Amino acid sequence: MGMGYYYPYIDPTYILVIAGALLCMLASANVNRTFQRYSRVGTMGHITGREVAERILYQAGITDVRIERISGNLTDHYDPRNKVVRLSDSVYDATSVAAVGVAAHECGHVIQHHKGYVPIKIRTAIVPIVNIGSKLSWPVILLGIILSSFQMIQIGIILFAFTFVFQIVTLPVEFDASHRALRILESNGTLYEEEWRGARKVLRAAAMTYVSAAVSTLLQLLRLVLLFGRRSNDD
């Protein structure tokens, strides 16, 4: 009972992988294009990304989180373990609408942790499982093919599914962080109306990268189920 039946590169379900990859490429291109566009639009207040982050954290009563520069482009993130907001070169000292929006978004994550936002607690809790699943899923599936073990293939698919679950949990976390950021920027008067709209476009484009990643992973998961589910039925 061999598994020579499986040749993913000629199987018609491979179109699902291609569709997912194209979707991610389009989302990535869109966020880069939108970020570059609003990186050229300065704010009337000439406030930098670092200053915006400092202002937001101060207003939220958060005093134990540092703000640091990190190299790269769109590498901004919040590190809850070390309590550091890391802003990229294109955000840290920049006074653009894009920089202000991104800095505020990362502070949105800080506030989520500070207030115990449930989805971010769930995401943090499942990270170890997801890391194991992402590393082992494909080796287990391939080993199952070699050994003609459908049970092992099923285990590999389940491990792969953890990645999709993580991405689904990530969606409300990212959308909520952007919502918090935009609400803060509007309420404290950091941006004028047109500037605020530009920041919203930047954050919406960034959010779509998470949506496209989730859809892409779902399509890959669907392909695995179609391929190996069909094989199980044939057996």
Image: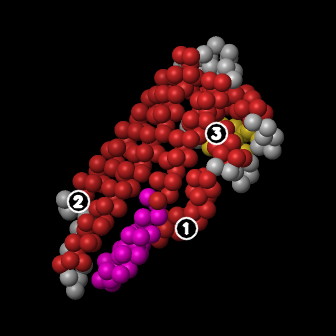
- The span shown in magenta is 137-164
Q: Quadrant of residue 140?
A: bottom left
- Residue 137, quarter of picture: bottom left
Image position, residue 63 (x, y; %): 81, 40
Single out the residue that lies furthest toward the bottom: 1
Residue 45 in picture, x, y percent from top left: 68, 15
Nearer mark to the viewer, of 2 and 3: 3
Q: Main secondary structure of the magenta part?
A: helix
- Residue 141 within the segment the image draws in magenta: yes
User: Could you tell me how far apart the alpha carbons at marks 2 and 1 are, in whole angstroms?
Assistant: 28 Å
Residue 157, how many percent across, how many down?
Answer: 38, 70
Instruction: Describe the element under mark 2 as helix, strand or loop.
Output: loop
Determine which residue is flagged by label 3.
108
44 vs 29, left or right, is right
Q: Residues within 10 Å of mark 1 (few under 14, many from 20)?
A: few
- Lateral position of residue 59 relative to residue 91, left or right: right
User: Residue placed farthest to the top in the image?
Assistant: 44
Separation (CA) of disc 2 from disc 3 = 39 Å
Residue beneath label 2, please?
A: 13
Residue beneath disc 1: 129
